Image (cartoon, rainbow, N blue to C red):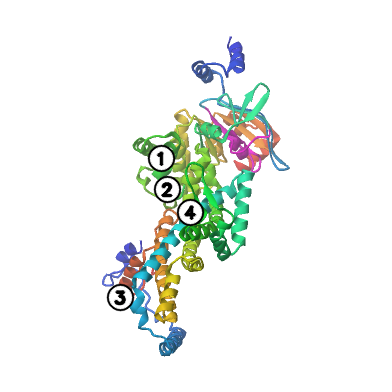
Amino acid sequence: MTEKSENVEKVEKVEKSEETEKTVKHTTVPMVKAEGVHKSFGHVEVLKGIDLEVKTGEVFCLIGPSGSGKSTFLRCINHLEKINAGRLYVDGELVGYRQKGDKLYELKDSEVALKRRDIGMVFQRFNLFPHMTALENVIEAPIQVKGTSRAQARERAMQLLERVGLADKAGNYPSQLSGGQQQRVAIARALAMDPKLMLFDEPTSALDPELVGDVLDVMRDLAESGMTMIVVTHEMGFAREVGDSLVFMDGGVVVESGNPRDVLTDPQHERTQAFLSKVL
Amino acid sequence: MTVDIDKTTGPADTPPAGPEAIKAIPVRHYGRYVSAVVALALLGGVIYAFSQGRINWGAIPDYFFNDRILGGVGNTLLLTVLSMLIGIVGGILLAVMRLSKNPVTSSIAWFYIWFFRGTPVLVQLIVWFNLGLVFEYINLGPIYRDEWSDFMTPFLTVLLGLGLNEAAYMAEICRAGLLAVDEGQTEAAHALGMSHAKTLRRIVIPQAMRVIVPPTGNEVINMLKTTSLVSVVQYSELFRVAQDIGQTSGAPAEMLFLAAAWYLLLTSVFSVGQYYLERYYARGSSRSLPPTPFQKIKANMLSLGRPKGGMA
């Protein structure tokens, strides 16, 4: 019965009323689904056919050597990069395109922006807005994009800054914060849009080793609250402890995937073994 | 910040524990004294030469606050401010157009900049003045209709001439500023769901201002002086008024010095304004804001009395 309804759901999804769509989504539709995703920059093919599924509520870790395409794949999910082939779905909807019959139509910039609201992203280099204080960074998008009132946005932002342990730094500019503090503000900024999915692009790679722990604590707390998270990381300890699934990528393909504890302790593939022996 | 540190290390009567502070005789810079004396002597010589010239210096204070001169100063200021306004708004618009992905808008911007940068502003002014040869009437349908010569007053001529020319230069300055903002900023704003326009307005332009303001200050000062060119199209700004008075009063050279003094005064005022504007846009880019001139003087006065610490 479930199989049948799933098929029907896929075919008739467009016509279905929102209510039924939502109830089905929670049970069957994965948060992110990639089918044969390819991406090239000029002549260089960075992703050579990625297939994977991220379930709602899970912490999904992407590991692999530099240049393996993990960050590129992450950026495809919120359409910062356009994919060249394959299909990529977030919450059951195509990323960047609309399908009518067997034709694909590019989405307008405004439609892409609308979808990005629901996807938070945390960058390796933080990318906080340097001309705004921590608080202003957090309230900017809710006010400008969602039209939240200033008072409401402030209240919510203070809660979020409290949650990442930086309520006392609300009035500081990014240049007055340490790297770890900046990254935690960046997480609060992404959370302020109430996303259903959070993307982390090597969030601790640009940090002093001492500051990594604070950021990972915030991420762990977020994972426990049930947020769906895709984390590109080199922190194997975090992946093992917090991750629900793990994918090892190399050369633009998924080499191995599974439960983080299994993959990290007992890798099956030769390439994974070689990588992990150097990292662990 | 320095004040805080001064407070802790400053009082000489309670020396900090540990090794005694170094008291060494500083290096004497004799070259500085010599060069100062030479420069002052040269300056004195130049001033003396001018004072002995056949120039009636008394005429300058007599006319400095003359009503016509003040009117000319007002017109010069008005023209500078308005044409810079056209230049800045137009420049930002052109820069955004030039950087846009739309090939039509970027070509238009490219052509505009090519044309207005490539022809002398004096020629442009005279062409604007004589545009009545091409257009006899101005006809905006039901909104406005008039003879061209009535519509195109000298003021509008020079305003358009200077403003549109300035926009071409400002466009390049703005483009440099927009390109200087890290691409990660745009990405972060887009990832939050902000539109292109909002990203530009809220995130990119405020940061580009840091790069844009210093050369724009330069442009303002340049514009203030360039307004003297419009005397060729019968607009009575400072330079033209000074020339007119010079001819009627029989003191042409004196009036030129007077005009120069006014220009110098106005550019000095603009420079101070620029400093504060730069300070405003520097917020967030450094840990503490640079001091205002007043704060700097105060700090210098305070530090004169005591030996310099490591932070000074």
Which numbered mark, 1 or 4, is in the foreground of this view?
A: 4
Hey, which quadrant is residue B171 in on the image? bottom right
Place of residue B166 in the rendered image (x, y in percent of width and height, measured from the top left): 53, 59
- In the picture, measured across the screen, residue B105 lies left or right of residue B297, that is right
Instruction: Report the Cα–Cα distance between label 2 and label 3.
Output: 39 Å
- Which circle marks residue A139 in the picture? 1
Disc 2 residue type? Met
Instruction: Report the Cα–Cα distance between label 1 and label 4.
Output: 49 Å
Residue matched to label 2: A132
Disc 4 residue type? Phe
Disc 1 residue type? Ile
Residue matched to label 4: B151
Which chain hosts label 1?
A
Place of residue B204 in the rendered image (x, y in percent of width and height, measured from the top left): 50, 48
- Which circle marks residue B305 in the picture? 3
Mark 2 Cα-neighbour bin, 10 Å: few <14, some 14–19, many ≥20: many
Which numbered mark, 2 or 3, is in the foreground of this view?
A: 2
Q: Can residue B124 be seen in this view?
A: yes
Residue under the point 53% across and 41% down: B196
Work out whether A131 lies above or below B62.
above
- In the picture, measured across the screen, residue B99 lies left or right of residue B72, that is right
Point out the tag, 2 or 1, that comes first from the N-terminus: 2
Instruction: Report the Cα–Cα distance between label 4 and label 3.
Output: 65 Å
Work out whether B145 lies above or below A39.
below
Which numbered mark, 3 or 1, is in the foreground of this view?
A: 1
